[in-house]
Structure formats: structure tokens, C-alpha cells
């Protein structure tokens, strides 16, 4: 009981601080939640931002702005009859408040191509685009089943034409080990597949193109994205290691099929690179975007400029392949959004007005 009372007191304090961060005009009648206008979200974020930049740098002329964002549980309001019991999706709809907060961040960065993780389905992605980003120019969208039991996929929204998509949901990448989290693994010895297959999306960097012209877009005007979301959780090191090797193999296969293909691997790698699961990709010639250019300082924050999640970790990355480079003068960055105070239960954090996601958008500007 004492812990529960302490949690309630802390959450009440946080809500009081949120109210104090709001402009007077945003505070409605007694007991009403604050109106989540862009000004309100900005005011709250300024109060609770821990990491990243408060404002997105301007995009250099002629550059292509690319971003990755684990948007956290983007579920629409439609009940998927295929999801039942512990995978039930009913009641998980992204709230209007979180739609407003995530859209505020995405509008701030203004990416031309946006790779998202934790998208329920293509229909959910389309629903979000209509409800939250209808005027952002994302004419093209892609999301496919990647083999996850909860139906969680990766998705792409783009201002440029999408030329092709592919997944590898059934690809065998290894064998399940004898132990999982220190206990006998019920899947021991069975074939291991991706927890979530990479989503390959090929984009044509042209303003518009007739269907008949898509196949003749030259290689230097194409970009191949591999959007990933690695296996999460302690005890999954062997699974992530297998995924890293398999993604590197896919990069090799795609390159072999078209040697001039320009590839970017991006998304949520679940844990920092120090675990070693990224080594096959880095050894294959891909470069962490933050190693490819200067990082803008983050005065007023208490952590590394490259922290990509609310706990200060750096799990979300953009890795550039051969032939892909930053635009001249470009500065890769992380856009900071609301991060809850320490010790606040994460379930309460998600209820804070202005909370967007447990991750931040990671952004870079590429040479055309």
C-alpha cells in the first residue's frame, strides 16, 4: 500500500506540474483535460524535455529528409478478429492526445520519408495519416505483415513514389538456443525466424512519375530502405545476433542483385549497439549516421545529444550504405519530446498530456 500511495502522489504532482506548464488559455474548466493545441504541446514539452533538440534544424536546399520513429502502439479503432486472448487489440486504439503529440513531433521535423515502427497494419497507418498528417504530403504509404504475433509491423510514409516492397517473415535465420532468460527454452532446437521481418521499401526520388515510368528511374534517383525492429527483451541476445547477421545477408543479396543500389538500414534495434548485434551490418560497410556528420549540441538537456528514447538509451539508428551520404551542411539530430520524470510508473507516463512515445524521432538530411 505505501508504494501505491507514493505512486498516486507522484502522478498527482506530475499532473500539477503539467498544468503549471500550460498557457492560461489552454486550461479549460475545472476537471477538464487541457486542450492539446500545438502551443500546449510545445509548452509541456519544454517543461519535461530531457534529450534531443527542442527545434528541428532547417533542411538544406535540395536534400531529402529521412526519419525513423518508433511511434509506440499505433493501433486504429477497428478490432482485428485474428487477434485474440493475450494478443487482443480491442481497446488499444491510439488516443487522440497521443495522435496529437506524435503528429506535433512529425510536423516539426517535416520528413520527406518517414519510417515508423510499431504500426498495427497498413489500415492503421492509413487511418493515422488521415487523422493526424493529412496535409503533410504523404501521398505514398507501405506496411506489410512482418510475422509478429501482435500484428505489429513497420511502415513508411513518403512524399516520393514507392516503387517496391518486400518482407522476409518466414526466413530461417538460425536455431533457438537451449536456454531463454536462464530457463529451458520450449523452442530449443526449432528454426528461428525474425521476430519482425525487415520491411524493404524502395523509393524513387522523383517528384512524380507515371506508373509506366517507375521502372526506368535511374539508380542514383532510388533509395532502398530496410526498416527494422529487432527482438526486444533481456535474454534475447542470441535472437538479436541472428537477426543482425540475417539483415546483413539481406543487404548483401540486395547489393548483389543491383550493385549500384543505395541502401539505408534504419529503425529500432532494441538495445544499444554495444551488444554486438550490429557488428555484421557495420562490417558490411554501413555507417551510423551520427558518425557521418557533426551532431548539434543540446544545451538544456541532461544527456547525450543522440539519446533516442526516454530512458536515455540509443536504440534507434539510421545506418547509411555505400553511395548514400549526408547533404552538404546537414546535421543529423534527435528531436526531443516529453520525457516523464524519473520514478514515474510508465503506465502513468503514457497518460501525461503531451506524451508522444517512449522513443524520439531520429532524423538526417541526405544528398539527392
Image (cartoon, grey):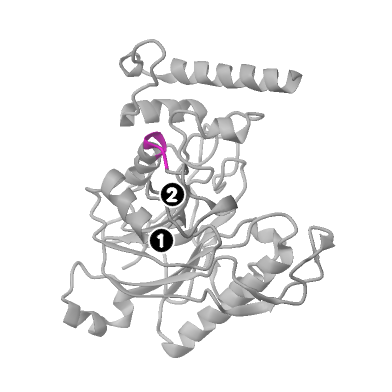
Extreme residue toward the top, this view: 30
Seen in the picture, residue 271 relative to 347 is either above or below; the reply is below
Q: Which mark is residue 71?
A: none
- Name the residue rendered at 54%, 48% in the picture: 308
Q: Position of residue 119 (x, y in %)?
A: 44, 55
Q: Marks 1 and 2, how far apart in space?
A: 10 Å
The answer, for residue 284, to whether it is visible in the render is: no
Magenta range is 94-98
Residue 96 shown in magenta: yes
Quadrant for the N terminus, please: top right
Can you tell which of label 1 and label 2 is closer to the viewer? 2
Q: Which mark is residue 155?
A: 1
Residue identified by numbered label 2: 74
Residue 303 shown in magenta: no
The answer, for residue 95, to whether it is visible in the render is: yes
Seen in the picture, residue 306 relative to 22 is either above or below; the reply is below
Seen in the picture, residue 365 relative to 34 is either above or below; the reply is below
Q: Position of 86 compared to 351: left or right? A: right
CB contact under 8 Å: marks 1 and 2: yes
Task: Please tell me whether mark 2 sits on a helix, a strand or a loop.
Answer: strand
Task: Please tell me whether mark 1 sits on a helix, a strand or a loop.
Answer: strand
Q: Position of 351 compared to 103: left or right? A: right
Dot placed on the residue nearer the N-terminal end, 1 or 2: 2
Amino acid at each position: 500500500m505505501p508504494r501505491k500511495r507514493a505512486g498516486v502522489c507522484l502522478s498527482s504532482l506530475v499532473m500539477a506540474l503539467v498544468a503549471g506548464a500550460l498557457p492560461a488559455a489552454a486550461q479549460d474548466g475545472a476537471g477538464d483535460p487541457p486542450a492539446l493545441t500545438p502551443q500546449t504541446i510545445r509548452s509541456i514539452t519544454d517543461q519535461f524535455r530531457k534529450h534531443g533538440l527542442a527545434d528541428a534544424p532547417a533542411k538544406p536546399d535540395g536534400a531529402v529528409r529521412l526519419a525513423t520513429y518508433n511511434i509506440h502502439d499505433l493501433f486504429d479503432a477497428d478490432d482485428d478478429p485474428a487477434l485474440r486472448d493475450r494478443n487482443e487489440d480491442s481497446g488499444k486504439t491510439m488516443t487522440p492526445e497521443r495522435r496529437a503529440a506524435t503528429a506535433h513531433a512529425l510536423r516539426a521535423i517535416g520528413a520527406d520519408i518517414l519510417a515508423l515502427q510499431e504500426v498495427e497494419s497498413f489500415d492503421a497507418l492509413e487511418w493515422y495519416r488521415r487523422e493526424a498528417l493529412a496535409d503533410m504530403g504523404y501521398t505514398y504509404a507501405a506496411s506489410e505483415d512482418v510475422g509478429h504475433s501482435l500484428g505489429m509491423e513497420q511502415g513508411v510514409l513518403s512524399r516520393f513514389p514507392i516503387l517496391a516492397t518486400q518482407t522476409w517473415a518466414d526466413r530461417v535465420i538460425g536455431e533457438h538456443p537451449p536456454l531463454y532468460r536462464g530457463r529451458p527454452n520450449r523452442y530449443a532446437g526449432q528454426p528461428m525466424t525474425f521476430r519482425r521481418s525487415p520491411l524493404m521499401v524502395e523509393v524513387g526520388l522523383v517528384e512524380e512519375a507515371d506508373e509506366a515510368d517507375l521502372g526506368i528511374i535511374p539508380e542514383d534517383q532510388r533509395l532502398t530502405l530496410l526498416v527494422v525492429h529487432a527482438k526486444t527483451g533481456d535474454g534475447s541476445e542470441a535472437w538479436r545476433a541472428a537477426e543482425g547477421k540475417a539483415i546483413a545477408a539481406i543487404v548483401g543479396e540486395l547489393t548483389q542483385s543491383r550493385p549500384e543500389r543505395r541502401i539505408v538500414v534504419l529503425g529500432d534495434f532494441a538495445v544499444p549497439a554495444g551488444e554486438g548485434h550490429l557488428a555484421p551490418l557495420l562490417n558490411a560497410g554501413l555507417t551510423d549516421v551520427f558518425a557521418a556528420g557533426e551532431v548539434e549540441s543540446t544545451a538544456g538537456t541532461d544527456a547525450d545529444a543522440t539519446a533516442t528514447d526516454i530512458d536515455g538509451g540509443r536504440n534507434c539508428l539510421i545506418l547509411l550504405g555505400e553511395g548514400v551520404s549526408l547533404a552538404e551542411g546537414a546535421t543529423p539530430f534527435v528531436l526531443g519530446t516529453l520525457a516523464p520524470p524519473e520514478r514515474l510508473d510508465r503506465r502513468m507516463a503514457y497518460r501525461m498530456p503531451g506524451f508522444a512515445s517512449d522513443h524520439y524521432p531520429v532524423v538526417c538530411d541526405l544528398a539527392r
